[in-house]
Image (spheres, grey):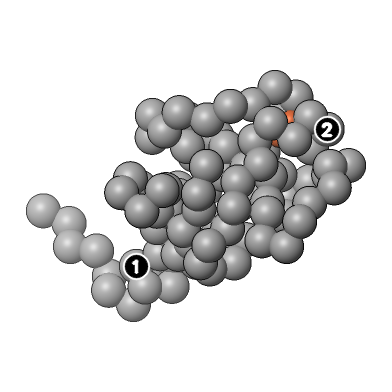
């Protein structure tokens, strides 16, 4: 049995908490939206390119890294799941 390296795990920990009850680990997918799909978390989307705004979520804890630009106007704390990835543990509201 392989035991995970606790230091490496702590550095790479990108746990995503959705609506305070669903928890999964982001695993290097292209976007948070892709990771949500991989983990069977239902999410509305359309363009997957930062145009429609349907994948907008509220980031309530942690930080994200943007992986593609967006044309959607965002309020404070809002992020687009198709355009970002977790940068450490995060919590979001859908
Ligand atoms: S799916 Fe359209 S902006 Fe994310």
- The residue located at (69%, 31%) in the rendering is 54
Question: Which class describes the residues within 10 Å of circle 1: few (<14), some (14-19), or many (20+)?
Answer: few
**x then y, percent, for residue 19:** 41, 48
Task: Judge left or right: residue 81 versus residue 35.
Answer: right
**x then y, percent, for residue 59:** 58, 58
- The residue located at (57%, 37%) in the rendering is 33
Q: Looking at the picture, tell me which residue is in the foreground, 29 or 57.
A: 57
Q: Nearer the viewer, mark 1 or mark 2?
A: 2
**Total marks in image:** 2
Q: CA distance from mark 1 to mark 2?
A: 34 Å
Mark 2 CB within 8 Å of ligand 1 = yes
CB atoms of marks 1 and 2 within 8 Å: no
Residue 31 visible in the picture: no
**x then y, percent, for residue 9:** 34, 67
Residue 3 visible in the picture: yes
Sequence order check: which comes first, mark 1 or mark 2?
A: 1
What SS does tag 2 mark? Answer: loop
What SS does tag 1 mark? Answer: helix
Please identify the residue farthest to the top as the structure is shown: 46
Residue 56 placement: quadrant: top right
Question: Which class describes the residues within 10 Å of circle 2: few (<14), some (14-19), or many (20+)?
Answer: some
Q: Which residue is mark 1?
A: 9
Q: Is residue 57 above or below residue 6?
A: above
Q: Which residue is mark 2?
A: 51
Q: Looking at the picture, tell me which residue is in the foreground, 9 or 72.
A: 72
- The residue located at (83%, 32%) in the rendering is 51
Please identify the residue farthest to the front as the structure is shown: 75
Task: Judge left or right: residue 73 versus residue 34.
Answer: right
Q: Is residue 6 above or below residue 1?
A: below
- The residue located at (79%, 37%) in the rendering is 50
**x then y, percent, for residue 38:** 43, 32
Residue 86 placement: quadrant: bottom right
């Amino acid at each position: 049995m392989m035991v995970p390296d606790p230091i490496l795990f702590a550095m790479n920990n990108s746990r995503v908490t959705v609506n305070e009850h669903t928890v999964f680990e982001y695993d290097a997918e292209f976007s948070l939206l892709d990771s949500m799909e991989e983990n069977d978390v239902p999410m509305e989307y359309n363009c997957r390119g930062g145009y429609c705004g349907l994948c907008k979520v509220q980031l309530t804890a942690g930080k994200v890294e943007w992986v593609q630009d967006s044309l959607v106007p965002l309020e404070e704390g809002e992020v687009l799941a198709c355009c970002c990835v977790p940068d450490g543990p995060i919590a979001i509201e859908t």
